Image (cartoon, helix red, strand yellow):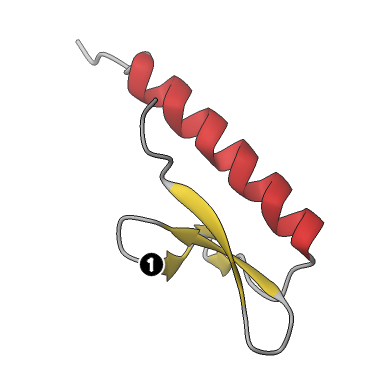
């Protein structure tokens, strides 16, 4: 199984952040960082990001 690109991290204040495992930085959507989330929210977002990332890597868009 391939390593997953996104994971969740519990912060010192008890909130959760979706992180990019390639650089340990918070993931973002349209410039909005995915931090200060509940554990459920962060886990769901990481799952969705990983699912999309795996699909994109398996089916790259080919430009002609």
Which residue lies most toward the left here? 64
Q: Residue, x 72% and y 77% (percent of image)?
A: 15
Q: Position of residue 28 (x, y in %)?
A: 52, 61
Q: Residue, x 55% and y 41% (percent of image)?
A: 49
Query: Is residue 61 depicted above or below 5 in this figure?
Result: above
The quarter of the rendered structure image containing the C terminus is top left
Q: Position of residue 17 (x, y in %)?
A: 61, 68
The quarter of the rendered structure image containing the N terminus is top left
Label 1 Cα neighbours within 10 Å, binned few <14 / some 14-19 / many ≥20: some
Q: Position of residue 52 (x, y in %)?
A: 52, 30
- Please give left or right for residue 17 compared with residue 23 in the image: right
- Element class at badge 1: loop
Q: State the image quarter where residue 23 is shown.
A: bottom left
Residue identifier under label 1: 24
Residue 29 seen anywhere in this rendered image of the structure: no
Q: Residue, x 48% and y 49% (percent of image)?
A: 6
Residue 32 seen anywhere in this rendered image of the structure: yes
Which residue lies most toward the front here? 1
Q: State the image quarter where residue 53 is shown.
A: top left
- Please give left or right for residue 14 compared with residue 19 in the image: right
Query: Is residue 50 depicted above or below 10 in this figure?
Result: above
Which residue lies most toward the bottom here? 13
- Please give left or right for residue 47 compared with residue 36 in the image: left
Query: Is residue 45 depicted above or below 32 in this figure?
Result: above
Q: Residue, x 63% and y 38% (percent of image)?
A: 48
Q: Nearer the viewer, residue 59 or 54?
A: 54
Q: Position of residue 43 (x, y in %)?
A: 69, 51
Query: Is residue 63 depicted above or below 9 in this figure?
Result: above
């Amino acid at each position: 199984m391939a390593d997953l690109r996104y994971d969740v991290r519990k912060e010192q204040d008890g909130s959760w952040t979706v992180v990019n495992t390639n650089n340990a930085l918070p993931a973002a959507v349209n410039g909005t960082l995915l931090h200060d989330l509940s554990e459920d929210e962060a886990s769901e977002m990481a799952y969705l990001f990983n699912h999309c990332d795996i699909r994109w890597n398996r089916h790259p868009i080919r430009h002609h």
